[in-house]
Image (cartoon, helix red, strand yellow):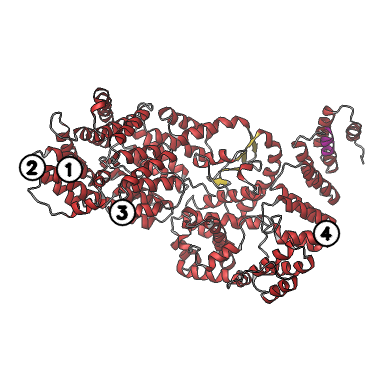
Amino acid sequence: MSGLVLRIGQGVVTRCIGGIAGIALRVGAAAIVVLAAAPSARAQSAPQARQQALAQAGVGRYSDAEQTARRGTQQPGGIAVQNTLGEILVLRGRRAEAESAFVRAAVPGSGAPDSLMARFNLAAAHYEDGRHDLALSEFDRFIDVYNAHADSLTSDEMTAVALAVERLGATNPELFKDALKAFDRAIALDGTNLRARNALGEMFLAKYNSADAQRTFEGALAVGPDDPGALLGAARRLAFDGQPGADSLVNRALAINPSYVPALVFRASQLVDLEYPAQAQQDVDRALSVNPNSVGALAVAAGIRYVAGDTVAFGKLNERAEAASPRNPSFYTDLAESAGRVRLYSAAAAFARQAIVADPRAWHAYAVLGMNQMRLGQIAKGRASLETAFKGDPYDVWTKNTLDLLDTFKNYDEVTDGKFQFMIEKDESAILSIYMKQLVQQAYDLFSTRYGYTPPPPIRIEVYRSHADFSVRTVGMAGLGALGVSFGTTLAFDSPAARDAGPFNWGSTMWHELAHTFTLGVSDHRVPRWFSEGLSVWEEHRGRPGWGFHVTPAFLQAFQAGKLVPVSRMNDGFMRPAYPGQLQFSYYQASLVCDLIARDWGDSALVQMLHGYARREGTEQVFRSVLHTDLKAFDARFTAYVQERFARQLRALSGDSTTVDALQPVARLSRLAAEDSTDFRVQLQVAHALIQRNETDAAVPVVERARRLFPEFSAGQDDGPYRWLARTYDARRDYARAADVLRGITANDETDYAIRLELARVLEAAGDIRGAADALEGAIFVNPFEIPVHEHLAELAEALKDHALDVRERQAVVALNPADLAGAYYRLALAQHVAGDDVSARRSVLRSLEQAPNFAQAQELLLAMVDGGGYE
C-alpha cells in the first residue's frame, strides 16, 4: 500500500453559511416541489415569499429564489426575508450584497424573526472577508445572548448560538463542549431542525468522531430523507470510514439540488483522490459557475492544476481565492490535504504552513503539517506541530491518537545501518534487525539498478508490534486493513509479532513497501496508486517464490463475469471497491498488467512509464507515449493475455458443475470424476467425499487431477485436499512427490508457516539439504521468533558449509535470548571462527564466558584463537 491517507478535509466541503438546503426541506419534499414550482406573485406576503424562496433554493433554483426573496423584502414585514435573501446571495458568491442584507436583518428591534441567525451570518461573512478578529469578537457576543436568554431562545436561535460558539472553539477548545450542548438543545426544541442536525454531524466529523457523526446524520435523514445536506454529511461519513456508498448518496443530493456547491466540491475532491482530474474539473466548473467565490471549489481546482504542473493556472486560482476570502486558511488546508492524499507530502507540508501564516489559530492546519512531517520522516518536527495542534484543539482524535503513538516511541530502538534507519520495538530489535538489514539491502540494490534511481537518505523503516499502532500511524485511528504503508522514504508496517494483524509474510511486505519508495521517487510521487501497487506486487513475485498475490478461482470467476475494472479505471478497484474481495483482485490484476507490459514491451517500459508520470502525463498519455497504444486497445490486449495465460484454469472453471452426492459408492464417485475430468469443481467435490471416507487409493488420482487443472489452488488449510495429498505421500515415504505438492502450496501461499516447516522436513528426508534450508528461511519471513528453527537452519548451513548462513542463524539464536545463552554464544563463536572472523569470535566467546566462567569448551576455543592454532 502506498501512502494514501483516507482523510476528509475540514474545508473540502465548505458549509453553507445559512444551511439553506436544510431549512428548505423542513417543509417536506413534496411541499418543496409544489412551492418551488408555484408561480411567483408580486402580491405574495413576506412569509409566503420567504417560504417559496427557501424551497427554490432547496432544489438549486438560486436565481428564482433571489428574485422571490427580493420581492418579499418589498412587502409589509419584508424585514423577515432579508436574512434569507442574504443566505441565497452567499450561495451565489455575492457576499458584499449579502452582508448588506444581513446588516438590515441583524439590527436590534428590526422585527426580523431570524435576526440572531443574521448576526451569525454577518460575523461569518466578516471572517470570510479576512476580518478574523472582528468576526471572533462578534461570535463572542453570542455567549452573552445565551447566558441572558437561554430559556427563551427558539430552536433556530439556539442553532445560531451553537454555530457561533463552535467558531469560538478556535480560541478556547472547551467551547466545543458548549457548542455541542447548544446543538443538542436546538434539536430538543425542534427535532425537524435539519440545520442543527447537519451542523452537529459536520462538527463530529471535523473531530474524527465517526460514530457520533453517523448517528447524527442518520437522525437527520430520518427527518428529511431528501435533504441534500444530510445526504452529503452521510456520504462524507462513509468516505471518512472508507465504506462504499458515498458516491450514490452525493448523486442523490445533486439529483435534488444540481447546484449544491458543497456536494459538487466533495464529489470533485473524491475524483481527484481517484486520480480522475478531468472528471473532477467538470464538477469544479459547475460549482464555480454557481458560486465563483467558493473557496472549496477554488482549492480543488488549484489542486488539479498543481498536480498537473500548471503553475500559471495554479497561481491565478490562488489569487482568486485570496480575493474571494482573504487570509482564509481553509484554502491552503484543503490543498494540503488533497496533496497528501495523492502522496505529495512535501507539497502538503508547504501548503499547511501557508494556512498557518494565513491564520495562526488554524489548529487543523498544524495537525495536517504534523502528519505530513511524520510522513516525511521528520519525527521531532511533526511532534512539535501536532502538540501545537492539540493544545489549540484537544478534540481532534487523529492528533490525539498520533501523539499517544509518539509517546510509545520510547519503547523502540533506533537502529541506523548505512542509508537505513530502523525503528523496532526493543524486545524485537535484536532479532528483526538481523534479517531486515540483509533483506532491505538486497531489495535496495536490486531496485536501484532496475529503476536507475537512488532515494535520498535516510530511508526510515518503522516496525510496529501492535497493528492498532501501525493503523494510527497510517490513518490516525485503529481499523486499517493493510499491513504496510510507504510514504516514500518513510515506511511503516506490522512486526511479525503483531498477531492482531493475523498471519502475514513480513519479508514480502517490506519488499513491497520499499518498491514503492522507488516507484514514487522515479515518478516524482505522480504515479497512480494502481500502477505503483501493481509494480510492488510484481516485484514481490520476483523477490521470492510464493510472495505476493496469486491467481485464485475467485479472481478468474470475477474475470469471467466481467467484474474486473478496466485499466483506464483501475484506481476504482483500490479506492472504492464495489464488492468484497475486489481490493485483493485489484492488487493482483495490477501486477498482471505489469507482467503483460514487461512481456511485450520489456522491463524498461515500466520504468519509462514512471518517467512519463513524472513529466505530468496522465495514464492515457503515458500508454500512448511509451507503449504506443491507447487504453481501449490495451484493455482488449489484457483480456486476451489473461485468457491465454490461464486458459487451462478458465476451462476448468467454465460451465455449470453438478453437485456431487458424497454418499454415492466409491466406484461411482471415481467414474464421475473421470467423466468430468476437466471440471475442477467436480474434482474437488469428489476428492473431499473420498477423503472423508478414508478412501485413499481412490482419492489420490482425483486430487492429482485437480492439481493439474488448477495448480495455483494451494488451499494449505489443514483439511485442504492438496495438504492431505502431501501427507499421504509423506506417510508412504514418497518424499519427492510430497515435496512437489508442498512446493505447490508454498508457491501460492506466502503466509503458511507450518507448511514451510513441513516442506523442510520432507526435503531433508529426501536428502535435499539446500532445499530444506531454503524452506526454513522462507518460514522465518513469516515467524522469526522460534529458536529451534534457527538452530536447525544453522545445522543445515553447517552441513552445507555455508558459513555466512551458519553465523547469521547463530546470531539469531543469541538475539532470542535462549535459556542456554552461554551455549548459544559459544556456538556463535565457533561458527564465526570457522568462517574466518576471529575478531567477532573472540568477542562472542568472551560473552559466553561472562555467562558461564567455567564453560570448558568456550575456554578451549578462546585459548585456541589466542594461540593462533587450529580448533576442531
* 107 horizontally vs 296: left or right: left
Quote the CA–CA distance across marks 4 and 1.
86 Å
In the rendered image, which residue does mark 4 sit on?
A: 731
> Toward the viewer: 560 or 323?
560
Give the extent of the magenta segment.
Answer: 822-829
In the rendered image, which residue does mark 1 sit on?
A: 85
Q: Earlier in the sequence, mark 1 or mark 3?
A: 1
The label shown at residue 75 is: 2
Most prominent secondary structure in the magenta stretch?
helix
What's under tag 3, amino acid-wise? Answer: Leu
Q: Are marks 4 and 1 in contact (CB under 8 Å)?
A: no
Quote the CA–CA distance across marks 3 and 4.
66 Å
What's under tag 4, amino acid-wise? Answer: Ala
Label 2 crowd bin: few (<14), some (14–19), many (20+), radius 10 Å? some
The label shown at residue 534 is: none
User: Which image quadrant: the C terminus?
Assistant: top right
The kind of secondary structure element at disc 3 is helix
| Whether residue 283 is situated above or below residue 398 in the rendered picture | below
Quote the CA–CA distance across marks 3 and 2.
33 Å
Q: Position of residue 215 (x, y in %)?
A: 40, 41
Residue occupying the point 47% across, 61% down: 622
Query: Does the magenta portion include 136?
Result: no
Q: Earlier in the sequence, mark 3 or mark 4?
A: 3
Q: Earlier in the sequence, mark 4 or mark 2?
A: 2
Quote the CA–CA distance across marks 4 and 2.
97 Å
Query: Does the magenta portion include 825?
Result: yes
Label 4 crowd bin: few (<14), some (14–19), many (20+), radius 10 Å? few
The quadrant in which residue 662 appears is bottom right
In the rendered image, which residue does mark 3 sit on?
A: 254
Q: Earlier in the sequence, mark 4 or mark 1?
A: 1
Q: Are marks 3 and 2 in contact (CB under 8 Å)?
A: no
Label 3 crowd bin: few (<14), some (14–19), many (20+), radius 10 Å? many
